[in-house]
Image: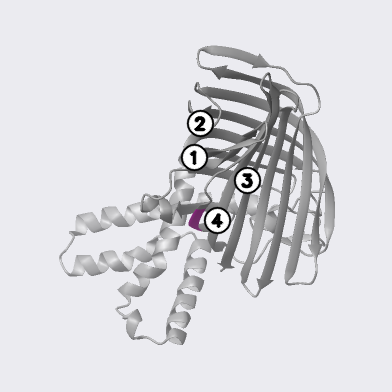
Amino acid sequence: MFRKIILFMLLFFAFMSPCQAQNTAGSNPARLKFSERKRIADSLRVELRRAADEGRMLQWGDSILKTQLDSGVITKRRFDRLSKNLVRYDKFLSHGDSVLASRYGKITYDTMYIHRPPGRWTVKFRANLSGATIGVEGGRQSGSYSGRLKSDYRGTLSASVSYRGLSLGLAVNPLKLVGKSKDNEFNINSYGNKFSFDVSVLSSKTYKGYVEENGLRMNVDKGAVKQRALNANVYYAFNGKRFSIPAAFSQNYIQKRSAGSFLLGASLDGQITDIDENAATNDKPVKLKIVEFAIGAGYGYNYVANRHLLVHISALPAFDVLAKSHVSVGDERVNLHYRFPNCIITGRGAVVYSWRNKFAGGSMLFNFSSFGSKDRLHIMRNKVRIRLFYGFRF
């Protein structure tokens, strides 16, 4: 925990220091030409990097303290104490930086195919769009039925700052801020050349669509169906020394030559769906719970069209080895039993264009799950997330 705090301080002080140093110089950025501001920013960047290498990242603050001492804002005793703190914190930050540098620079891959990008810092801006659909079909004593429900699309804007692979980011949903979105979604992912995982948690109250039974079609209004869903995927790339998934999705590696890899993965999918009474053909509230765990294998490929353009595509189908579900209608609960095969399919795609110290592109993550049997209840769930991004390194 202490190391994480030190690393966070490293990010904070190093990211904030250019602005403070520039203000200290007494210049007014608004009156400077763009070329002059760029020159000043670059010189500050070089100086901060040299100071970090020498273990005195924070000690540039001495000039500020001396100014405050000369003007009488602080006493000599306080000046000495703060100066000593700067030296002590620099030792902690220097240690944290060396740990990050060791991990970030460790070569466990074929450098003919993969390499780390230049620069320690990466700033990235992203626009995210996601949505989900549910398809149902089955039969009961009154006949067969089918339906399709679709949630509202969720859009977010995010920005992140990374230092040697350690990232700090912030995301906002503009529609959520103005009260026009009732859905919540949480995503976390970690991409490595060999091991990777992603987790998505969704709470949606905006599903709407239709249900059709014995030829009679009835609309399902928004809010009548609510769902909480968890989807988690973990996978292993056998050719992780030459094939880089993070080159396509997190951009903390660069794929130099085309390469592919077989993938081994596992997926966990959980759903709790509540259907209000009098929604479509229901005269009682219905609650459906499904948990399934699947194991499978697939393939991924990174195509390097030229030194600027990377295209990624991968698919990993998995089949259930554990599945449990039950449905509650009013106070009555019935366990549902299904036979093989039930499946979860995860597909990914990405396009990354790089030039100089910049990069831009888009990525897609698609999750499909099929559970149940058509003679009783068959549920198909799709979830897609699309990202557009732009970033630069320095």
**Which residue lies most toward the front here?**
215
Q: CA distance from mark 1 to mark 4?
A: 26 Å
**Any mark on residue 107, and which?**
none
Secondary structure beneath label 2: loop
Q: In terms of sequence position, does the residue under pointer 1 or pointer 2 come before the other?
A: 1
**Any mark on residue 128, and which?**
4
Residue for badge 2: 279
Q: In terms of sequence position, does the residue under pointer 2 or pointer 4 come before the other?
A: 4
Residue for badge 1: 221
Q: Amino acid at mark 1?
A: Asp
Secondary structure beneath label 4: strand
Q: CA distance from mark 2 to mark 3?
A: 40 Å
Q: In terms of sequence position, does the residue under pointer 3 or pointer 1 come before the other?
A: 3
At a point 53% along the width and 42% down the height, the residue shown is: 208
Q: In terms of sequence position, does the residue under pointer 4 or pointer 3 come before the other?
A: 4
Residue for badge 3: 190
Tag in front: 4 or 3: 4
Q: Which residues are magenta?
A: 155-159
Q: Amino acid at mark 4?
A: Asn
Nearer to me, 140 or 183:
140
Q: Amino acid at mark 3?
A: Ser
Q: Amino acid at mark 2?
A: Ala
Crowdedness near tag 4: few (<14), some (14–19) or many (≥20) residues, C-alpha within 10 Å:
some
